[in-house]
Image (cartoon, rainbow, N blue to C red):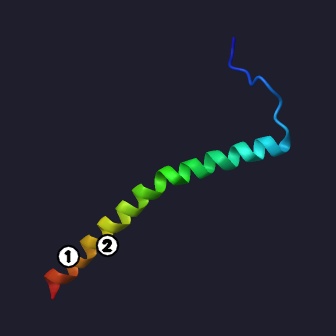
C-alpha cells in the first residue's frame, strides 16, 4: 500500500504548501551561502594582501 494524501488539495492549499517548502529551503540555505561568501571574500582579501 502506497503513501496517500488524506485530503484533496485545492489550488490555494497546494500553492501555499509549495511556497512554505521553498521558503523553508531558502531559510536553511541562506546561512550556508552567507558563510561561503564570507570565506570567498576573506580568501580574496588575503590574496590581495600577499601580492601587495
Query: Picture coordinates of residue 7 (x, y %)?
Result: 80, 26
Q: Is the N terminus in the top left, top right, bottom left or bottom right quadrant?
A: top right
For residue 40, side relative to residue 52 (left or right): right
**Residue shown at 84% from the left, 43% from the top:** 11
Crowd around label 1: few <14 · some 14–19 · many ≥20 (10 Å): few
Give SS at disc 2.
helix
Residue 31 falls in which quadrant of the image? bottom left
Crowd around label 2: few <14 · some 14–19 · many ≥20 (10 Å): few
Residue that numbered label 2 is attached to: 41
**Residue shown at 47% from the left, 58% from the top:** 30
Query: Picture coordinates of residue 49 (x, y %)?
Result: 17, 82
Residue 44 falls in which quadrant of the image? bottom left
For residue 34, side relative to residue 46 (left or right): right
Q: Is the C terminus in the top left, top right, bottom left or bottom right quadrant?
A: bottom left
Badge count: 2
Give SS at disc 1.
helix
Q: Relative to 22, does residue 4 appear above or below in the rendering?
A: above
**Residue shown at 74% from the left, 25% from the top:** 5
**Residue shown at 81% from the left, 35% from the top:** 9
Residue that numbered label 1 is attached to: 46
Residue 21 falls in which quadrant of the image? top right
Q: Relative to 48, does residue 35 appear above or below in the rendering?
A: above
For residue 8, side relative to residue 19 (left or right): right
Q: Using the numbered discs, state the Cα–Cα distance from disc 2 to disc 1 in whole angstroms.
A: 9 Å
Amino acid at each position: 500500500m502506497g503513501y496517500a494524501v488524506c485530503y484533496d488539495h485545492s489550488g490555494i492549499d497546494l500553492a501555499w504548501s509549495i511556497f512554505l517548502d521553498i521558503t523553508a529551503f531558502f531559510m536553511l540555505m541562506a546561512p550556508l551561502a552567507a558563510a561561503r561568501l564570507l570565506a570567498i571574500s576573506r580568501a580574496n582579501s588575503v590574496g590581495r594582501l600577499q601580492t601587495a
